[in-house]
Image: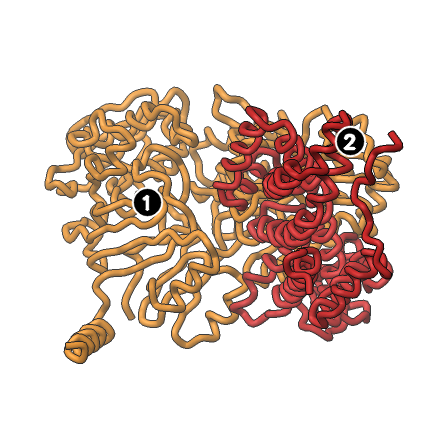
Chain colours: A red, B orange
Amino acid sequence: MSATPPAAPPMRDAQSPFARLAGDFFANPVAAFGLGLLAAIVLLAIFAPLVSPQDPYDLAQIDVIDGRLPPGSRSSTGSRFWLGTDDQGRDMLSAIFYGLRISLAVGAASTVLALAIGLAAGLAAAYAGGRFESFVMRIVDIQLSFPAILIALILIAVLGQGTGKVIAALVTIQWAYYARTVRAAALVEKRREYVEAARCLALPPARIVFRHLLPNGLPPLIVVATVQVAAAIALEATLSFLGLGLPITEPSLGLLIANGYQYLLSGKYWISFFPGVALLATIVAINLVADQLRDVLNPRLQR
Amino acid sequence: MRRALGTVVAIVALAVASGAPAQSLRIGLAADVTSIDPHYINLIPNNNIAEHIFDKLVRMDADSRLVPGLATSWKPIGATTWEFRLRKGVKFHDGSDLTAADVAFSIDRVARIENSPGPFVAYTKAITAIDIVDPTTIRFRTASPHPLMPNDLSTIYIVSRKVASGASTEDFNTGRATVGSGPYRFVRYVNGDRIELVRNDGWWGGKAPFSGVTFRILKNDAARVAAILSGDVDAIEQPPIADLTRLSADPRFVVVSKISHRVIFFNFNHLERSSPFVTDRDGRQLARNPFRDLRVRRAMSKAVNRTAMVERVMEGHASPSGQLVSANLFGHVPGLEADAFDPEGAKRLLAEAGYPDGFQLTIHAPAGRYVNDEKIAQAAAQMLTRVGIVSKVETLPMAPYSARASRQEFSFHLLGWGASTGKASSPLRSLLATFDRDKGTGAVNWGRYSNPALDLLIAEAVGEVDDGRRRGLLEQATRLAMADVALMPLHFQFAIWATRKGIAYAPRTDEYTLAFQFRAT
């Protein structure tokens, strides 16, 4: 076993690869801004219970008497609603923090699960080849030929509503992207000499797949995953907007926007506007980070 | 060329804008019309269209009072027979005469509709035999005295025997069998999109003011408002409450409303078994169903602030309710008010009933069936949570919702009931009488409330011929049911219409949007 070549031979540069990546990443100020914004949003979401003036999911704390107050109003008990309230008297600022929490959690959870499933399916398909590969990839093709929102709607209609079910629907939609990406990358690597060498050494397939194919297929996957987090968040918001996502007493960003949508014509802009801005900021931040990651991780674009 | 075209367009536009009273009316409807067959399903949006094409023996005025329709008079002759005299000279749209034979055929057809999701048979079931005395006299025999006959027949549309014999629901939808005697004739039905009708100049009730009407199905609230704002339609029903302030303030539009016959209420699950939607504070299922305890039901009624609900959630477009029918309907109990908002009293009652820490509850509500239904449920959840009944809300579309509710799957669910016969006997019979498929009572008693004393009173009232005594019995039954908090009324919603200036509509309690009742001003 001592003759085994190291899986991914580290470059013996002056810098560690991570430090080099970090350096490349922050070379672009826009991307740095995106990362900073994303970090701020994630922190706000994680510490929402500490920074929110109100727990918007505790029905005992909200009062319909305070409904539809414009930004800056005072409640019947004297506290201030900086971003106004929705129709149920929920403080919009708190609702947005908590909504971010749900959106990010749903986005992250569905991405991780879809990534794991897509990765396993894609790698297995690429390594096994033959009928198994055709079978898996045809499923992927069929699924990718349907619009994501259509699949999500059907799944929610069948499964019913709830956080777990929304995540399940998002995973079902997204695994196909990862499977396709990772298979493509693994197919390229599979024909490289070092993999052939590993085979000649009679290494077990699991080791070849996980130590050789996987690490080299990761960079494109990371890029796809970051973009897909944003897509998952947008899709969850769409489902919630259509009234098919999460329970209405625990609104996510999409549901907050939907609640305010009917008040737009009557001038109560804040119910939709602020959650919309929060959703936009989140997705833009993730996309900025994803763009830069793609540039940094793509060897062909290396400066 | 382009300039010439522009001129033509301008002239046409001017002609349309200045044309004296508009000839054709365009109305935006809030709900889907699922069929043109007037006997297929008893559903307000479908009936709304049938009201234009077909006539009924007895009609209802804007306040849900009975007025003559095809029948000019009716009276009981003997204990179990009703005689109706028909209007002379009424013709169907195809020119043939409408006679007693068509009436008998129509009543017979109601029972022969197969697979109806909501049949009209409840209203014809009492009839055991029909005698055609002459072309304008018809008698209905019943097994027992049936004073509600004119009310029941105010729901049955009369179709042509000649054309509709053997006709299927599909034949009505395509228009082949859609021959009525009403103020408008059928032109076109595009499922989910529009219904076009043209005036029947020979209608016995007088020529309608507009020569034609196009009903557009605009289920989405925002789309409906946008349609009237942009001038695509002349009038809409149920403008969303959120937009009323804006519409009323705009001089181009007129908003009218009237208290509707529809009561919005919460149904309790009265079954012995406890449902998974009620648990203790730690999420364990309760051994017994708390809603069987009157103290719990009363506590919940006291916990809900109906005034705040009407003012904040309904923005004033509803009236708090402590009973089943509104003030202008038969059987309304004068002075029977809703429970006053009393959270402390509610907590005391809960403690007495053995729930000092309250319990957890999932409230179910339909999404978009009634005005602000989801918001009502959420506001109620807040109010109940504050007295210790920690609540969350689940909403679903009406079709799966009613299917599940009718299987007693829910613990506490929101519902609305329009007293379509204009009398308190309608909600009492359908919502609160003990469920009995054979007798046709308690058809929508989805909480399975059962109170023998109430059943007796309802049966007595339904069989009572004297109006005064019947009113007394209905009031007594309502008092009994409300004292027992058999269900929890919240409010009567308002029926609202918005029209463009120059067109007037007299609002109706039955929520119907009737083209022949619109006037150019």
- Read off the residue under disc 1: B59
- Read off the residue under disc 2: A207
Name the kind of residue labelled 1 in the image.
Answer: Arg
Q: Which-is-in-front pick, marks 2 and 1? A: 2
Q: In 3D space, how far apart are the residues under numbered discs 2 and 1 (Cα atoms)?
A: 82 Å
- Placement of B223 over or under B64, stated as above or below: below
Residue B141 in the image: x percent, y percent? 32, 23
Q: Where the N terminus of chain B falls, by quadrant?
A: bottom left
- Can residue A133 be seen? yes
Frontmost residue, B296 versus B148: B296
Indicate the quadrant where residue B314 lies.
bottom right
Name the kind of residue labelled 2 in the image.
Answer: Arg
Residue A227 in the image: x percent, y percent? 64, 54
Residue B465 placement, left or right of A283: left
Q: Secondary structure at mark 1?
A: strand
Q: Chain of mark 2?
A: A
Residue at x 71% of width, y 67% of height:
A31
